Amino acid sequence: MKNLIYTWKNSKLPPPEPEKLIPFVKRASELAGLPDSGWNFEIEFTDDELMTRRNMELLGHEGTTDVITFSYFTGDDDDFILEGETAIDAVVNPDAAMREGEKRKNSCYARELALYIVHALLHSSGLDDIDPADRRRMRYHERRVLKKLQEENLLVFSGPDCWI
């Protein structure tokens, strides 16, 4: 990955610190097995209201969700992505991360947000979670990547309001 390009469109929650977010995303993309070339990853961080609109506009689905991913990697020959082009677009919902982080044991806002980004990268590497077997495989790789990032001190969790 060459660049992480992100916008923060959530007025209720604080934006990420670039000096923590960028190394996290770069290393996560490596651990997800994505090509190490000059492609860009664009993330739009939203709120529930905007995510509801994006979910309808982009997928024709009603309601909010946690993450939407569009990957332009083909899996066959990813050389078609030119230097500096966007290879992955993701829409990530921090409001969902806050809700899930409060609800799940051993989680927090930051851990959920990190999970959504890793999930988008794993989808882009070819993993899916439609059927139960694929879902188990996805969950395994999510845990593997997050564990490695934590071992490398790229994840810092300090409580319910923590950030990566």
Image (cartoon, grey):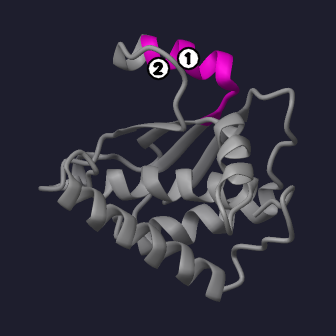
Q: Secondary structure at mark 2?
A: helix
Nearest the viewer among 138 and 123 is: 138
Evaluate whether residue 133 shows in this view: yes
As drawn, 41 above or below 122: above
Q: Label for residue 69?
A: none
- By secondary structure, the bulk of the magenta-drawn segment is best described as helix
Residue 158 locus on image (x, y percent): 86, 71
Residue 48 locus on image (x, y percent): 66, 23
Nearest the viewer among 4 and 58 is: 58
The magenta-colored residue range is 44-56
Name the residue at 50% across, 38% down: 67
Magenta segment includes 161 = no
Q: At label 2, which amino acid type do we have?
A: Asn
Q: At label 1, which amino acid type do we have?
A: Thr
Residue 161 locus on image (x, y percent): 87, 55
Q: Residue furthest bottom?
A: 151
Magenta segment includes 51 = yes
**Which residue carries the number 2 mark?**
55
Name the residue at 49% across, 48% down: 40
Name the residue at 74% across, 51% down: 102
Evaluate whether residue 2 shows in this view: no
- Neighbourhood count class around disc 2 (C-alpha, 10 Å): few under 14, some 14–19, many 20 upward: some
Name the residue at 40% across, 18% down: 58
**Cβ atoms under marks 1 and 2 closer than 8 Å:** yes
33 sits left or right of 10 in the view: left
Q: Label for residue 52?
A: 1
Quarter of the figure with residue 159: bottom right
As drawn, 12 above or below 156: above
As drawn, 109 above or below 152: above
Residue 42 locus on image (x, y percent): 55, 40
